[in-house]
Image (spheres, grey):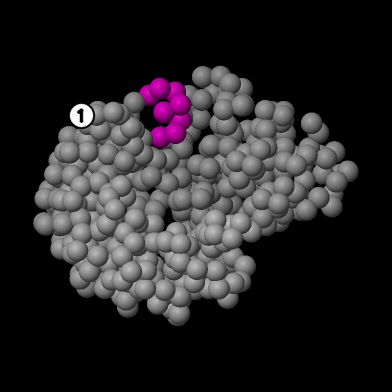
Amino acid sequence: MGTAASETTDGGSALISAVRAGDTALVKSLLQEDSDPDMREAAFCLAVRTYAGDIAQLLLQHGADAGQSSPDELLPLREAVASGSPVLVEALLDARIRDRYPESELLETRDLARHWHEAGAGAELRRRTGAKETLVRTRVQDDEYYSIGELTLGGTSVRDGHAAILTDLEELLGIRASFEELMARALDHDQDHTAWGRATILLAHRRDQETWAAAAALRTHPDPSHRLFGAEVLRLTHLFDDSDAEAFAGPALDIFIDWSTKETDLTVLTEVLNALGEHTDSRADAALLAYAGYPHGGVRCAVAAGFGTESELPAFSDDVREALLVLMTDVDTAVRRGACLTVGQGRDRAPVLVEAMAALLDDADRQVQVAAVQGLALHDDERCVAAARRLGPPQPGFLAEEHYLDAAWRYEWRRYGR
């Protein structure tokens, strides 16, 4: 393919320039515009060589073919592992080039990841650089969903995602780490760290009674972080259960209903309520109702988002409807937005709910207004059209505005054929 030549002959490529600048947002925008389709493989190689794993993954998601690159155009797997960036390692292990790495190399890089993890990224970085100055720690986004730590010393930077990399390599090699070991890797970090996410997702996908029992036993652990880990594994196990029998639905609901009445830690309670919101059972709604007026906004937000999971029902219960009406006037912006999304995406066409959404078109927060536009469009209320026009084109924000505002366009097309 000749990446260097591609860069030389097309040095003005907007996509290559954006990758070289590390501008993830611009790369995403260019890819959505289908800009430079022939430059995607060159851009992928450049992203990998410059340690921009998130951009490399973005390019793969938008059609870049890793298989078109030659090994000498990419970063060696060992260097990617040492960098501590899970998303960078994941890009190099793309299915189209995974067979380039013999098992012996995968085992060596597994051992390297384990060494960095057990030594500690900071301690290993200091040993390798020999620098004496203070270690600088920052938090960076490694992929679309998780963030990790970045450590800089003596002009050298590494990320602290070696535990997540170790988990990924073990899975690829067919090595089954124990529940306890995966939990220990997660608990070295917080819930937003990649190491935590990799561990809970891997355990949840096992969907076996041994893992279920180990996670369920944590609900009485004195340390909230252990309870949080157990709650997330149980929640994801049920969420990922695609079997016809849904073997974990009943046990999970019983556990989370009981747990919700006893949990005292706000973070764990929020996770438990999020889990209840994923169940299509009136008992889950009843458990959520108990927290509709809770003083903490994050808890109320979980309640607002959790109602209405049983979407096949034509209407909310009277108690849930009343709770949602109150939550749509909550002082917390996220709660109002969550309640509006729940009402908008539900099948309950009660006029009082539609009018409550219409009132939010004048909310002080744009994202609440966007949610109201979508809700009214889904309920075939023509007020969504003028409101969408007032808001103008989609803007970057917490919600994917383009998707939500497009609901008003789709309403116009359904009603007016334009």
Whether the magenta-drawn stretch holds residue 168 is answered as: yes
* Residue nearer the viewer, 127 or 309: 309
Majority secondary structure of magenta residues: helix
Residue 178 picture quarter: top left
Residue 299 at least partly seen: no
* Residue nearer the viewer, 314 or 390: 314
Range of magenta residues: 167-175
| Drawn side of residue 132 relative to residue 230, left or right | right
Residue under the point 41% across and 74% down: 358
| Drawn side of residue 226 relative to residue 338, left or right | left
User: Where is residue 43 shown, x and y percent of the image?
Assistant: 72, 43
User: Where is residue 341 shown, x and y percent of the image?
Assistant: 39, 62
Amino acid type, label 1: Gln
| Drawn side of residue 14 relative to residue 396, left or right | right
| Drawn side of residue 316 relative to residue 171, left or right | left
Q: Secondary structure at mark 1?
A: helix
Up-down: is 294 above or below 157? below
Residue under the point 33% across and 37% down: 240
Identity of the residue furthest to the front in this view: 416
- The residue pinned by badge 1 equals 209
User: Where is residue 316 shown, x and y percent of the image?
Assistant: 25, 58
Q: Quadrant of the C terminus?
A: bottom right
Whether the magenta-drawn stretch holds residue 143 is answered as: no
- Badge 1 density bin: few <14, some 14–19, many ≥20, Cα 10 Å: few
* Residue nearer the viewer, 280 or 169: 280
Identity of the residue furthest to the right in this view: 9
Q: Quadrant of the N terminus?
A: top right
Residue under the point 51% across and 30% down: 109
